[in-house]
Image (tube, coloured by chain):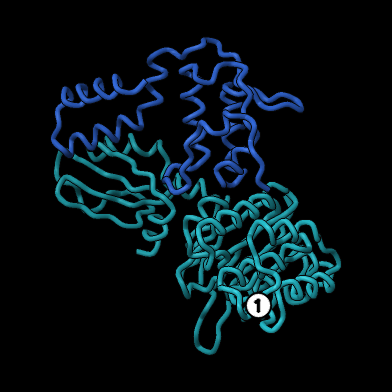
Chain colours: A cyan, B blue
Amino acid sequence: MNTVVSAANLSKSIGAKSILRDISMEVTSGHVVGILGKNGAGKTTLLEVLLGFSPPTSGSSSVFGNDSLRLPVHSKQRIGFVPQRDELINEITGAQQLSLIGSLSHRWNGALIERLVASWEIPLNTRIKDLSGGERQKLSTILALGHEPQLLVLDEPASSLDPIARRLFLREILDIAADEARTVLFSTHIVSDLERVANRVVIVREGHIAWAGELDTLKETVVRLHVDARHALPAAFGLDHVIRQQVAGARASIVASHWHPNLKEELEQRLDAQISVEQMGLEDIFVELHS
Amino acid sequence: MTKPNDNPTVRVFVLQPTSGVPIYRQLIDQVRRMVLSGQLPPGTEMPSVRDVAEEYTVNPTTISKAYSLLELEGLLQRNRGKPMTVAALRRRHGAVTNRLKELEPQIDSLVLAAHQLDLQASDLIDLIERKMQEDP
């Protein structure tokens, strides 16, 4: 597995406002990485800094081993980027926009474009200013796929798509994911999309990384414990990594990270209690990590 | 790309991406149950990782993780250039205690909910018996 994107201690401030704080991360090839965060958490800025569109205040980042701020052309050609706000030209048609971008690209898969235009139902002969938000988003995504990038970066993709279009879009991402040489990095606040297609997740909270790793691991190690004890419980349990706890007499509900099934029996004995372990979906985990 | 998956086994699973149980874990549990119960007999061809990922629109890595762990467990067999198959079992059906162990997580949460609802074991057993008679 090759490192495709890497960041070391990235921080970014605009004036007195800190947007990103000490972000270090690595994206290896063949993965689909979802960056999850509330609105305003710094997801867009993070993508922009990683791709070198905007310089960090401190720290550094690289793409394909080259400093993001000095990416050689051959590296840029291997990247596809779909910005949150599209950069389509309003006065021309979709067909014209496609042939414009196609003619500027060093490689262009016309057959792929044709297939996507048909299956995503994009009206090509309408002027772009007359397209709906969803149609614009689809066109903008296709434009980033035409040169078959090794690294596809999408900022809030599919946010204006209906459920059918969104499913078609996710299938295309998975098709790319099936190729181990290609990598997808996307930001979103739509948890259910991320749960389907990402195998790794980076949770960004107030400009820094709250959790990063495999989605499966996140679901296995962040759990809600329901404790039912024989006697009133102490206020402190001696359990590490508690995110939130509520104790009421002999009952308690605890959200903890770093959980391992082996911990259950020891804790049950120590507290003289029955514990049931509830595994949480990503949405719940996301909410708890923000509590 | 969407194409019809010709192996019907691809459709027997129920994978829920929003569940707290990771997708690979859901698949392992289901394959294990189906193999132990004989629903997936030895020699059954498994759908490819890519077909399962496509059918359920989920990341292929989690499916391939499930297949690898099932192979380690001896339930699935990897065949050169051919689909994986359900391995020949030492015993076709696991012993009842083994099969019951598969249900322990569900039983644990059932028991907890029963306690909270102040139900007796006998109430539960009656209901389970009735439900099991309803469903084949």
Residue A8 drawn at (x, y percent) = 64, 67
Query: What residue lies at 16% left-to-right and 45% top-to-bottom?
Result: A250
Q: Can residue A27 be seen in this view?
A: no
Query: What residue lies at 55% left-to-right and 62% top-to-bottom?
Result: A35
Q: Is residue A259 above or below residue A188?
A: above
Label 1: chain letter: A
Quadrant of the rendered image containing residue B111? top left
Report how many numbered discs are placed on residues in the image: 1
Quadrant of the rendered image containing residue A103? bottom right
Looking at the rendered structure, the kind of residue marked 1 is: Ile
Q: What element carries label 1?
A: helix
B66 or B85: nearer the viewer: B85
Residue A155 drawn at (x, y percent) = 59, 69
Q: In this view, does B72 lie above or below A254?
A: above
Q: Is residue B117 visible?
A: yes
User: Which residue is the site of mark 1?
Assistant: A128
Quadrant holding the C terminus of chain A? bottom left
Residue A41 drawn at (x, y percent) = 48, 72
Query: What residue lies at 58% left-to-right and 21% top-to-bottom?
Result: B74
Query: Relative to A143, is A271 on the left or the right?
Result: left
Residue most extreme to the bottom: A15
